[in-house]
Every structure is written in C-alpha cells, then in structure tokens.
Amino acid sequence: MKRPFICYMMVSALTLAGGCAQPPTDKLTTAEKAVNEARAAGAPTYLAEDFAKLEGMLTAAKREIAEQDAKFAMLRDYDKAEQLLVTVETDAARVNTDATKKKEEAKAVALQAQQAAQEAVKATQELVKKAPVGKDQKPLQAIKADAQGLIASLSEVQTALDAGDYRVAQIKAKAIQEKSLAVQAEIQRAMTKVGAAKGQKDKQVKKHPSQ
Amino acid sequence: MPAPTRVFLSGCSMVILLIGSLAACVQTAPPELLEAVESLDRDLVAIQGAEFAPTEYARFVQDWAALKGRMLAEEDVIRWPWEPNPLAAHLQKVQEEGEQAMAVATQRKEEERRDAEARLTLLDRRLRIFNSRVDEMESRVVLGQRPIETELLVRQAHSFLDQGLFARSLQATEQASTLIVAQTALLTTELKRYADERLVGTWRQMARRTIAWSRTNQATAILVNKADRRLTIYRNGRPVVSYQVRLGYNGIMEKRYQGDGATPEGQYRVVKKRDRGQTQFYRALLLDYPNAEDRRRFHKARRTGAIPTGAFIGGQIEIHGEDGLPMSQTLGCLMLDNRQMDKLFEKVEVGAPVTIIGALKVSNPVALALADLEQFEEG
C-alpha cells in the first residue's frame, strides 16, 4: 500500500510543479524590441511624452515580473505583467508609426527651409556683386564676409539634416534665410543711397555746367 | 397566503438580496478620480513632463501603467462591501504623483524659460554693445565671418526660445557668448597697440618731426591720424585744415602685405600728383610706400612666418578722391571726398611729407572702445 501512495504523491508534486507559472521572457523581449524600434524611429524627439509612457509601462511590467519572481513558485502569477507587455508592444508599434510620420513631416519642413535658405544666400551673393561702397557705408569686405559666413552656415543645416535633427536644421535654415534677407536689404539701401546721390550730382552738374 | 407561495416569495427575496449584495461587492475605480488622473496625464503631455520632470513623470507613468494593468486584471474581482477599495487608493496615489510631476514640471519649465530669456536678453545687450564698439573702431573686417556666425546663433536662440526649446536656446546663447569672447580677444590682440604708450609715444614723435619740418621749411606737410580718421594739413608748422578721411577696408590694422586692406603707418613723401584722367579715383597723391622701414618689417614678417609665404609688400598707396563706381573701395589708401581732394591737391606739392600714425594719445577712440569691450567682458 505504501509504494502506490508515494508514487501518487510524487506524480501530484510533479504535476503541481509543472503547472507553476513561467515568466513571460519572450513577451518581454518582443516588447523591449518594439520600444527600441520606436526609439530608433525618433520617438524620444518627436513623441517624447508617448515614448516616456512606453518606457514607464515597460518598467512597470519588469517590476511586476520581479515581484512575481520573488514569490513562492506556486503562487506566481504573470498575467498582469503579460497584459502590460502586450500593451507595450501594441503602443510601441503605434508610437513608432506616429513618430516616423512626425519625423517625415519635420524633415519635409526642414528641407523646405533649407531650400529657402539656399535661395536667399544665392540671391545675396548675386547682390553682393553689385554692392556699392560709399563713404558712410559698411565696407564691401564686411558684406562679403557676411555672405561667405552665410554660405558656410548652410553646411551646418546639412549636418543637422544628416543627423536627423530636423527641428534644429529648420531653425538654422530660418536664421540663415532671415539674415540673408537682412544683408540684401542692407545692400539695396546702399544702392538706393548711391543712386540718389548720383542723381543729385548729375542734377548739380546740369545746373552748374562750369563746375 | 398559502404556505408554498410564502416559501417561494421568501426564497425569491433571498435570491434578490444575495444578488444585490454580490453586485455591490464588484468594486470599480471611482470615475471622478479616474477622470482627474486622465486629465493630469493630458496636462503633463502638454507641459512636456518627460523633459522638465523626468523622474517624477516616469514614476507617474509607471504607476499609471501598473494601475491600468491592475484595473484590467481585477475587473471581475468581487470583494465584501466592508473591504476598502484598493483601486481607489491606488488611483489616489497616482493622482498625487501626477500632481507632483505637474508641479515640478511647471516650476522647472518656468525657471528654464526665465533663465533662457534672461541670458538671451543679456546676450542681445552684449552683442549690441559689441557691434557698436566694433563699428566705432571700424574693425568689422578683422573679425571675418565670426560676426555673422554670432548673429545666426542669436537668431537661433530666439527661435528655440519661442518654440519652448529652452535647453537648445541656452546652448545657442552659450555658443554665441563664447564667440563674442573670442572676437574680443582677437580685437585685443590686433588693436592693443593703440593703447601701447611706447608705440603711441613713437607716433607722437613722428608727428612732431613732421610738424617741425613744416615749420622749419615753411612748407606744407600732411598728418594722418588713423584712430581719429583725420587728415590735417600743416603749413609753416600750423594746422590749416582738417578733413575726415577714409582708410582701407581693414585700415585700422597694421599694414603687413599687399591686399590686407590695411593702411600703412610711417613717414612718407608725395612722389607723384595724378590729376583727372591719370587716376580712376578723381585726383590722387601717390606716396613712396613701401619705404625702407616698411621693407625691413615686411622681410622680417616673411622670415618669421607671420605673413603668408607668397605675400607681396604691395605699393601704390595714395591719398585720392572718390571714383563714383559702385565697386570702388580703398585697399589701404586714404580717401577724401572730391571737393576736399581738390583743395588738398592744390595745396600739396611733390616731395611734401605725409606722416601716417595710429594715434596721438593713449586715450584714442580705438583704445577707449577696446577698453570698454574688455571691461564689459570682465563685468
């Protein structure tokens, strides 16, 4: 009678042990991968708060797993952690898509700003060729240095674009465009001044042909 | 009422009572509390909680996520009515964490905004003063592309500030400030000679010698003061007339080689008078630059590598009028307006001494502007 009882006990114990919950390792790996992909898509920059939530959920899931791990094997329940990890994975995919979209939008805006800046710098260069130098005007060399500086700054826009830092690229491009327009306006004012002075001179010469 | 009916009715009421009490035991999160936490969550997104209160926001987000999971897991849990509602307690905790994150984020965002704005305002003022002193010294060309780099950074700092990117704004402000410091240092290196008592003393002696020559020889001599941008005609040792003069595009600098735009300092003589038709600059007085001293200095600079290897010493330094062409500029010459040039041309003969000095006094406009800049940077 004794032997069958021991066997029964062993089978029961094994059945119970086999029935113990296992940590959701695969789900955790998948969720972490999804979060990393969202990070790579630029979520920390373009959807910072949503990304922070993702990371928060992942941490909460990990904490839950750790809490369950600390419990007696038979009392472990990873259901809550699993649910959180499934939510992380689903949300990460959405954040990834939205971040990619936002990044693309920012890229388009930055590229547009870059083009506007390039055109403005080119127009400035053209105008510099016609820039006059009068007695009270800024020396041509200074204006030339400004134009050179603007050309050099365009490379910073490209660097920011290459780094995927589209907001910075856009702001840099905007600053270049604005300054280019300011330099153009400065040259235009000087040209008008010189033109007016020349006109006055011509008039005087007509009035006093003996001079 | 017959007994079976009574028994049936009492059985039904018992069942209803049991169901009623069981229904009361299914505990859900209080909706008003839930709405308050959701609202906090939205506000924290709007205020950029993740950026301005990362720790507090992360704690809120983690607990909020855990609570959501818990609400999902405990949807069907039935508790006795006298048991406390753990979801409400958890929500309360999350709400408190959210409020704390909100308070921290609001405070930090405001602090960063004020800090970025204050620094940018200071930078704007600093840049205005800097530009004004640079204009006073006519030393803009010395700085090359740095002024435009600085201005672009300042514009970027303003844009970042407007977009609420305070850390970026501060970064651009810092970079611009560093550039201003570097430019001040460059100006000090290049122009400190205007504050050098020994050198100013030498220039004063040169001026005295020229005036003495004019007196001794009862003749006309010209003295040009670069710091004051004045050309003074002396006759018989007395100043007759003084004109505002324009220097080379980089005229305030010491002349080193051809094409540097600097106006030379030294004692020269008029070697040729070029009248209308003989020069593109109306009328001109050609000077004997380079003289022996200029050559000695040039060769020494070339030997020591202070100037580019292929550099030439140059020549053709004149006092001339304006040509009226849009591209006209002086590359190191001295320019007067044509009416003044007429007067000078009539008064001066070939052989007349022309002395060009940096300054007559240590407290000259260049030295004063430079000191002002340095003082501002130190302050």
Image (tube, rainbow, N blue to C red):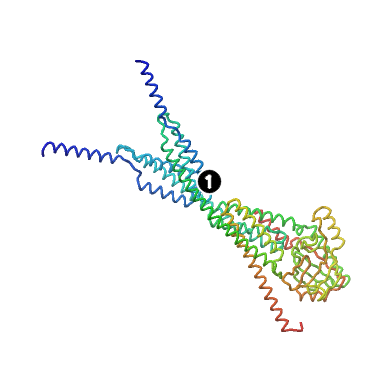
- Vertical relation: B212 (above or below) B3: below
Q: Which residue in the rendered view is the most extreme toward the left?
A: B2
Q: Residues within 10 Å of mark 1 (few under 14, many from 20)?
A: many
Provide the secondary structure element on which disc 1 rests: helix
Q: How many marks?
A: 1
The residue positioned 75% from the left and 84% from the top of the image is A209
Residue A59, x across and y down, in percent: 48, 40
Q: Chain of mark 1?
A: A
Asked whether, in this view, residue A74 is left or right of residue B18, the answer is right
* Percent position of residue B361, x then y: 77, 62
Work out whether residue A19 or residue A79 is closer to the camera in this orientation and state it. Answer: A19
State the image coordinates of residue A116 (x, y, percent, origin top left). Answer: 60, 62
Quadrant containing the C terminus of chain B in the rendered view: bottom right
Give the residue at x 81% y 65%.
B356
Quarter of the image containing the N terminus of chain B? top left
Disc 1 marks which amino acid?
Answer: Arg
Is B75 placed left or right of B3 in the picture?
A: right
Q: Nearer the viewer, residue A206 or A23?
A: A23
Would residue B94 be found to the left or right of residue B82 on screen? Answer: right
Identify whether A93 is placed above or below B375: above
Q: Is residue B370 above or below residue B18?
A: below
Q: Quadrant of residue A147?
A: bottom right
Looking at this view, is B322 or B224 the one in front? B322
As drawn, the residue found furthest toward the right would be B217
Give the percent coordinates (x, y) of residue B316: 82, 67
Residue under label 1: A39
- The answer to which quarter of the image holds residue B327 is bottom right
